[in-house]
Amino acid sequence: MFKVIFKYPLFLGVFLHYFVSFSQQTVPQFGVEQTIHFGSILPHRPLVNAVVEGHSLIYEFSFYKNTLGKKQWQQAYNYPKIGISAMILQLGNKEKLGNSYGVFPYIQFPISNKKIEWNIRFGYGLGYIEKPFDRETNFKNTVIGSTYNVLINLNSLWRIKLNENISTSAGISLVHFSNGSFTRPNLGINVFSLNAGLAYNFGLKKDLIQNEIPKREKNWSKIVLVNVGIKEIPPVEGPKYMVYTTSFSFQKAFSNKSSYGFSADLFYNSSLEQLISDEENKTTSNSDNARAGLSVFYSLDVGKVSYLIQMGGYLRTAYDGDGFIYHRITSRYYINKNLFFNLGLKTHWAVADFIEFGIGYKFNSPSK
């Protein structure tokens, strides 16, 4: 056989083309999915119990695109799905909360590609609460005070393919509504649920691209970041306060998928002076609004977007009502290899502090 192959190059070419085509996996370009969630609001604070009356029901419709590996990060993450979802939520208390609605983009990562495929999906976008707190008409809703909120969704799901185009799934999901203390009250709404879905893939089938992925250089980079935010403190319907933050960080690639680093953080929260005066009855000054801290972070790097989880401790703070540990959940979109936009939520454990928007610059180390 080998003599025939080497003697007839045309036969060799046809054989290789057939073998590669046969072994290469193809997927449809697009897909739609319908998902039903059944669960309830988690009473993470005693005041939340006042609005938890019945179970929550969520209907979700999603449109997604199957990635093909045209970009290296798509291959590194095992060809994730990128999509957009719309949700209708019955929160279990029509009188105090009404219905809720949400629209958000998401990315779905395959973790295991066995017969039962395990996926992790993450997305965030805009959430609408039909009946927020109102001093006159809805004062019993002590959970959330704004109509428009940030919606965050995390879903762990297991999928079974019924055929080339149809699959079914079951999962566990968390939907979170919060305005980041822009408007009080803001205890937030967390809906925990079990879900089941049915998906249909359609469109032209294309081959998955499988190339050798070069390893990222593991050099330290320096990052400068500035942010601004707005928050409200008790009492309800009080004034808004500006928050300014800046950070200087060192970051290093851990793998083709992730990075880690540490940061020096400075905060100027103009509400702290008022909080100290109200709660501790002390003489205050503008310097009491300043905080300084050190933090560590882990970054999941997905093409031009990075998702960061950060945990730090205050080295200096005049107000101790929040404790001394702070967290940040952040996403960054890189305009180019250096400049990026920043969107984050700063918290003290499960209590939101403020939402921050900003811009940063990454000083990449020269290649070795």
Image (tube, helix red, strand yellow):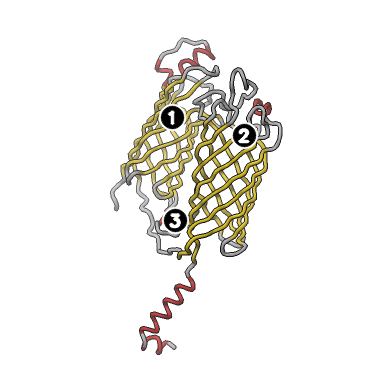
Q: Determine whether the residue tagged by mark 1 lies in a helix, strand or loop.
A: strand
Q: x and y percent of residue 275 in the render?
A: 50, 17
Residue under label 1: 293
**Picture layout, residue 324 above or below residue 204:** above
**Picture layout, residue 17 above or below residue 183:** below
**Quadrant hosting residue 287:** top left
Residues at marks 2 and 1, CA–CA distance in whole angstroms:
40 Å
Q: Earlier in the sequence, mark 3 or mark 2?
A: 3
Of residues 163 and 256, the one drawn nearer to the viewer in this rendering: 163
Q: Is residue 155 left or right of residue 314?
A: right
Q: Are marks 1 and 3 in contact (CB under 8 Å)?
A: no
Residues at marks 3 and 2, CA–CA distance in whole angstroms:
36 Å
**Quadrant hosting residue 340:** top left
Classed neighbour count for the residue bearing mark 3: other residues with Cα under 10 Å, few (<14), some (14–19), many (≥20): some
Image point (49%, 67%), residue name = 25
**Picture layout, residue 299 above or below residue 321:** below
Q: How many marks?
A: 3
**Picture layout, residue 258 above or below residue 327:** below
Classed neighbour count for the residue bearing mark 1: other residues with Cα under 10 Å, few (<14), some (14–19), many (≥20): some
Q: Are marks 2 and 1 in contact (CB under 8 Å)?
A: no
Of residues 200 and 283, the one drawn nearer to the viewer in this rendering: 200
Marking on residue 99: 2
Q: x and y percent of residue 259 in the render?
A: 42, 47
User: The residue under label 2 is which amino acid type?
Assistant: Asn
User: The residue under label 3 is which amino acid type?
Assistant: Gln
Q: Determine whether the residue tagged by mark 3 lies in a helix, strand or loop.
A: helix
Marking on residue 74: 3
